[in-house]
Image (cartoon, rainbow, N blue to C red):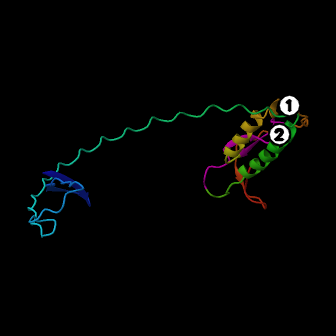
Amino acid sequence: MRKVWLVVGGALLGWACSVEPVVTLGPDAGPSPGTAGMHGTGAAGATGTAGTTGTAGTTGAAGTTGAAGRGGSTGTAGAGGAGGAGGNVCASIETMYSAAVTKAKMCSAGSGKQQCQFVVSISLPCPSCMTHVNDTSDISTLQIMYQQAGCNTMPHICPAIACVNPGTGACVATTAGDVCM
């Protein structure tokens, strides 16, 4: 008796069957008179028995996660800038500072709010004269940029003028708009 297993659509099917030995006849052998199978009708085979159900396979173990990647290498520093170009950068920052002071001097007369409480220099290269403003955020940023660019260490020719003491700041209405004085 031989068992045959077959997997069909995920189901395991089994059969049991018997195999009859094969008889080989020599070259001189003739048909055996009166035996069934050669010339007659053979008998029906025995009914096979049902196969047994197989056991399920074991599941595989979970895979392991990969190791963390490593960071890239540090880049090299860039080449230094050419000397002598500071004048253009400094002049640009000075122009932006002047515009920031003008904007920061704007106020709203008659609003009842306390205004014009901050005092700043009217010029970066010649920081002797002071004025009142409402906001110093842009002005402070430009002052830091000016120092970081080394502009404050360069020689400047400043006019010999007497600065007026700014006193207490107040918002004053003018024809050009309200401004800190």
- Tell me the residue at 61%/55% (across/down): 112
Q: Are marks 1 and 2 in contact (CB under 8 Å)?
A: yes
How many numbered dots are placed on residues in this image?
2
Above or below for 85 versus 17 = above
Query: In front: 28, or 154?
Result: 28
Q: Amino acid at mark 2?
A: Cys
- Tell me the residue at 82%/44% (across/down): 92
In the picture of the structure, the residue carrying the numbered disc 2 is 90
- Tell me the residue at 12%/70% (across/down): 41
- State which tag comes first along the sequence, 1 or 2: 2
Judge whether residue 2 is colored magenta: no
In the rendering, which numbered label is found on residue 154? Answer: 1
Q: Position of residue 125 (x, y in %)?
A: 83, 37
Judge whether residue 127 is colored magenta: yes
Q: Considering the numbered disc 1 on the image, is that residue within a helix, a strand or a loop?
A: loop
Q: Position of residue 174 (x, y in %)?
A: 77, 59
Left or right: 52 in relation to 71: left
In the rendering, which numbered label is found on residue 80? Answer: none
Query: In front: 2, or 122?
Result: 2
Chief secondary structure of the magenta span? loop
Q: Amino acid at mark 1?
A: Met
Query: In front: 80, or 83?
Result: 80
Left or right: 44 in relation to 103: left
Can the viewer see residue 181 in this picture? no
Q: Residues within 10 Å of mark 2 (few under 14, many from 20)?
A: many
Q: Which residues are magenta?
A: 112-132
